[in-house]
Amino acid sequence: MTPRTVFRTLAVTEAITWVALLTGMFVKYAVGTTELGVQVAGPIHGVAFIAYCLVTVVVAVDQRWSRRRTLLGLVSAVPPLMTVWFDRHVEKRDGLDDRWHSRQDSDAAPQRAVSLLLRHRRRALAGFVVTVAALTGIALLAGPPVG
Ligand code: HEM
């Protein structure tokens, strides 16, 4: 997968889980029949949120986003559907392409770290899954931010 496809997949997934959570909230508060939608969509959205943030950091390093753009990318995970807006925003500004830029001999240490991940994709994917699971566990123990 390229930086563009990885980022877009996570941005769209995050937005879809927001729609599911909003639907659950509509049923919970407006219809008032069941809380099940929120109870199911809440943790799924939580996992998508964490996965999106991790991928944003990796893609930001690789695509050499400025701190401001990286922060905007992370903050876009908070309001509903803004990750899709952000994806279009960077695309229009040539901030996402289909080539990984990180190299073993890159001048910046974070890019060398991303290059290491790219050279060991299977292990990087396993590490990603473990990290998302660990952060999800911590967030669930800490309690959902809303509700
Ligand atoms: C900025 C990020 C997040 C936002 C804006 C957010 C927002 C929300 C909202 C609005 C609800 C519905 C609450 C209600 O009305 O009942 C909710 C539910 C929930 N969220 Fe999050 N959330 C975020 C991150 C997370 C994370 C990281 C986790 C953990 C993995 C998480 C776990 C949950 C759970 C378990 C529920 C369901 C609570 C219940 O059963 O009532 N959320 N979240």
Image: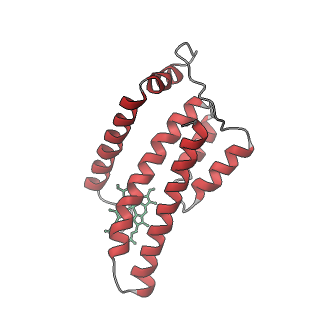
Question: Within the image, what quadrant is residue 12 found in?
Answer: bottom right
Which residue appears at 57% of the width and 61% of the height? 81
Image position, residue 138 (x, y; %): 28, 48
The answer to whether any part of residue 51 appears in the image is yes
Image position, residue 119 (x, y; %): 46, 22
Query: Considering the image in quadrants, where does the N terminus appear?
Result: top right
Which residue appears at 34% of the width and 82% of the height? 34
Q: Is residue 124 left or right of residue 83?
A: left
Image position, residue 71 (x, y; %): 57, 43
**Relative to 123, does residue 54 appear above or below in the rendering?**
below
Q: Is residue 123 left or right of residue 56?
A: left
The count of marks equals 0
**Relative to 108, does residue 84 appear above or below in the rendering?**
below
Give ligand 1's quarter of the image. Answer: bottom left
The answer to whether any part of residue 78 appears in the image is no
Q: Is residue 30 left or right of residue 8?
A: left
Image position, residue 120 (x, y; %): 41, 25
